[in-house]
Image (cartoon, rainbow, N blue to C red):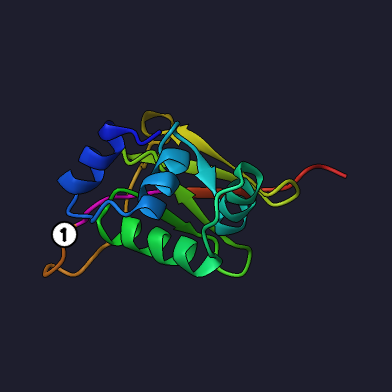
Amino acid sequence: MINMKTIEFLKKNNISPTKQRVDLAEIIFREKQHFTAADLIEVVAQTGLKISQATIYNTLCLFEKKNILKTIDLQNDCKFYDTNLSPHHHLYNTSTNILTDIKEEEINFSRLPNIPKSLVIEKTEVLIKVKNKN
């Protein structure tokens, strides 16, 4: 069953609501969550939807470009997608590959580096990497 709220959400963000995009948006935005493209591919397969990996990657890229999905790039480790667009920080456990939110007010900066006068700080986000003790 097609969810009209999802279609309106996509249209409001200037995204053409194809069936695959609506299906993926239903999965992605059902809750605030972190996930990788591989996680999404697995969920899509489990639900029985017939959506190619290329369409999944292209849709993730489109949602990111339209600023309805945030990317947390952990360089060589992996790339996570985040549906929580409010300002916040992250804790990444390299042992479990789990990314967790840290509320913005839980981290305070005593000072920031000097930046060129031609620039202004847009936002400051912290990523703390941890691993399980032996």
Residue sitting at x 52%, y 43%: 34
Q: Is residue 80 left or right of residue 109?
A: right
Q: Which residues are magenta?
A: 121-125
Figure label count: 1
Give x and y (percent) for residue 98: 64, 44
Residue sitting at x 44%, y 32%: 30
Rendered image quadrant of residue 120? bottom left
What main secondary structure does the magenta stretch of the protein show?
A: loop
Give x and y (percent) for residue 55: 45, 65
Q: Is residue 80 left or right of residue 67?
A: right
- 43 in the magenta segment: no
Give x and y (percent) for residue 89: 44, 42
Q: Is residue 60 left or right of residue 49?
A: left
**Residue at the disc numbered 1:** 120
Residue sitting at x 38%, y 49%: 125
Question: Disc 1 residue type?
Answer: Val
Residue 31 higher or lower than 46, as above or below: above
